[in-house]
Image (cartoon, rainbow, N blue to C red):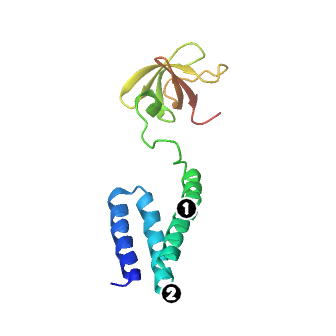
Amino acid sequence: MPAWLVWLAIAAVLGTAEILTLAFAAGLMASAAVVAAMVAAAGGGIGAQAIAFAATSFASLPVVLSLARRRGLAGASAYRSGVAALANRPAVVLTEVDAVAGTVRIGGEVWSARAYDETQVIPAGARVTVFEIDGATALVYPREFS
């Protein structure tokens, strides 16, 4: 069996693994296997094929990392839980919110709240956004500034 065909078979297996796992690593190695297949088809020896595979694998890492950073995926989980999941969520003011007290409804839950900007007083019925959760109190700011 020709070496280029072996590399294409490896690329197919790695491509299938990438589709099933979506981990990016198998996809990078699949593209490197295609490059190694091209080197083999051009008559390169096993050493040249291995170097092409390794060089393409390592060269593709910065490309994927820059794409991940651009999309905000590097070092951060897409899934937020607990109070972290409440940040940037919309809420409705139930009782007037000022620098000291108030209540808001976030989703289906009622939370005590304070205005993020201590100089603001947000009337009941206003739509706000949760900035963060401090203990059991939501720090909120109005959606439309007037």
Crowding at label 1, few (<14), some or many (≥20) Cα neighbours within 10 Å? few
- Is residue 62 rendered to the left or right of residue 112? right
Which image quadrant for residue 3? bottom left
| Residue 58 numbered mark, or none | 1
- Vertical arrangement, residue 113 with respect to residue 47, above or below: above
Circles 2 and 1, Cβ within 8 Å, touching? The answer is: no
Task: Name the foreground residue: 65 vs 104.
Answer: 65
Residue type (three-letter) at the residue carrying disc 2? Ala
Q: Position of residue 12 (x, y in %)?
A: 35, 72
Q: Position of residue 85 (x, y in %)?
A: 44, 33
Q: Mark 2 vs mark 1: which is more N-terminal?
A: 2
Instruction: Describe residue 81's horizontal placement relative to residue 70 as left or right.
Output: left
Mark on residue 125?
Answer: none
Labelled disc at residue 42: 2
Judging from the image, what secondary structure is the residue with disc 1 in? helix
- Where is 65 relative to 125, above or below? below
